[in-house]
Image (tube, grey):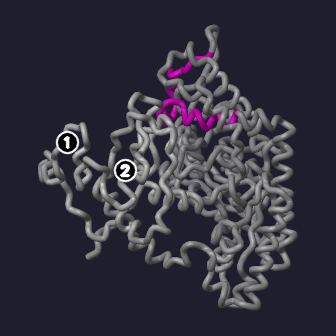
Amino acid sequence: MSDRPANADRVSVASPTRSRGLDERLDRGPDQVLEPPIFEKGSSGRCGIDGGPRRDSGKAGAALPPEGLLADGLALDGSPPEGLPADGLALAGSPLEGLSADDLPLDDSLLRDDLETFPELSEPEVLRHYLRLSKLNYSAASNFYPLGSCTMKYNPPANEAAAALPGFSSIHPYAPESTVQGALKLIAGLESCLCELSGLDAVSLQPAAGAQGELAGIKIIRAYHCDRGAARSKILIPESAHGTNPASATLSGYACVVVPCNERGIISASTVKDLLDDEVAALMVTNPSTLGLFEEEIESIADLVHEAGGLLYMDGANMNALMGVAKPGHMGADVLQFNLHKTFSTPHGGGGPGAGPVAVRGDLEKYLPLPRLRHGDDGFFWDYDLPDSIGRVRSFYGNFAILVRAYAYLLACGGDGLCEVTRMAVLAANYLRARLEDSYHLPYPARSMHEVVFSDKLQNSFGVKTLDVAKRLLDYGFHAPTIYFPLVVHGALMIEPTETESLETLDAFADAMIAIAEEARSDGESLLAAPHATPLARLDETRAARSPKLVWRPAG
């Protein structure tokens, strides 16, 4: 190294552990020893935790390693530089000069015995391990994610950039209202958009998830009936409903009455009429249903519920099939929750954050969670004077960054764009239906909306079940669709492609599903052992659920 500074007469050395590791590497022979890294001017010659050089920004006295030294600060023969002790700890010119490892001023209580069998790894090894794991993550950003009833649509990075703007990301919920008028205007704008899309009169953005919005909606229904003298005791729920529907009803103190579907997979007005009485507080209905079918008799059903003094709650989980084309309020819905992570492209978090705004007709607005956003002479402000409100359902005003993302999506699409989103989502589902209906059983013949549900009836004759199809899909590079739901379809395969996937992606998925159906006929045993190409083979899911191993424990 011809550019070595004249004052480079000191080098730092690595710990004895690294020295021993170097000895092992040197044992491989001179031809297998890696060349030392090239140090540039301004590099101190000290090694970072990753084994590479640390930068000292050209400090005076910054040194390069003497010729013949490795990055560890050791000579190629493994010995320390001249003038430094063999244990590598007595750093020349440091407070530890002249001390050996045994002389370090550490109390025994501060030292830990080695953990037997515990791996000793360098930082690069640990980093690479977690990077490898990260590459195993599956998301809508990297792959097709056909989970039915989940609307795993693409989350545009532009929405993330909007949410990260300092004017949104750096404000505090307790900031004076006069200083956050832009943020409040955004909230008002999103509320207005959701009112327009739902055909309802008022919206609260406070609920932090679709299920919480649903619970808030049922609490509003209960408050409405209590104001009229009795909360009533029952809520009607179709057998094809999401599991959160009976959960919300039960948490609100109601008994659940199941409404059976007819032979076409929808609920009929005559069936609902037979179940109505003066104890029914509401009917909860998802439209389109979890079978991907439009409830054709929804208006007649709404009229019957209203005549009996009840309210119609519509689960908005499947609004991706209606947005911009049809409005729940026009169908007779009184209360509706949105799932912003489904319809409006905000991320599906690992349990959060989320947003599940709840919309209501005009006479129910007074029951919405407080505070409510108002506009006066001095701009937007929060109104807490709401004696009939069901109260808060979340701290502050909701998950604001999620609301920013949803509003950015709405503005980017515009009215015409939202209509196109719905039409393309419905078209994609029906395209997959047409491609797969000869290979998989369709339990209901009615035209699908945004998702299509098959069953494993044809594959059962070869000893292959829905789970086997789902596991085999992993070998083809696809996440499985929702399986075994809705419960009204035995061995259900529930596929929702969303509007964001290309024709090539849909064809690749359909080709894989068709190939698996053929394998079921010709090589069922191979399917039963799938997946074959994943890092882990098929797990004993029952034992894993009942006896999970969640932490590392020493052997024995």
Q: Residues within 10 Å of mark 1 (few under 14, many from 20)?
A: some
Q: Residues within 10 Å of mark 2 (few under 14, many from 20)?
A: many
The residue nearer to you, when weighing 86 against 496, is 86
Q: CA distance from mark 2 to mark 1?
A: 17 Å
| Spot occupied by residue 510 in the image (x, y as percentages of width and height) | 81, 70
| Spot occupied by residue 331 in the image (x, y as percentages of width and height) | 78, 45
Q: Can the viewer see residue 387? A: yes
Q: Secondary structure at mark 1?
A: loop
In the image, what residue occupies the spot 65% across and 42% down? Answer: 335
In the image, what residue occupies the spot 24% across and 55% down? Answer: 86
- Side of 63 relative to 145 (left or right): left
Which numbered mark, 2 or 1, is in the foreground of this view?
Answer: 2
- Side of 403 relative to 417 (left or right): left
| Spot occupied by residue 530 in the image (x, y as percentages of width and height) | 63, 81
The residue nearer to you, when weighing 345 against 357, is 345
In the image, what residue occupies the spot 60% across and 42% down? Answer: 356
Magenta stretch contains residue 478: no
174 w.r.t. 429: above or below:
above
Give the mark nearest the N terminus, 2 or 1.
2
- In the rendered image, which residue does mark 1 sit on? 96
419 w.r.t. 122: above or below:
above
| Spot occupied by residue 302 in the image (x, y as percentages of width and height) | 73, 49
| Residue most extreme to the top | 377
Q: Can the viewer see residue 481? A: no
Q: Are marks 2 and 1 in contact (CB under 8 Å)?
A: no
In the image, what residue occupies the spot 46% across and 49% down? Answer: 52
Q: Residue type at mark 2?
A: Gly
- In the rendered image, which residue does mark 2 sit on? 73
Q: Residue type at mark 1?
A: Leu
Quarter of the rendering containing residue 505: bottom right
Quarter of the rendering containing residue 273: bottom right
What span is colored magenta in the figure? Answer: 380-407
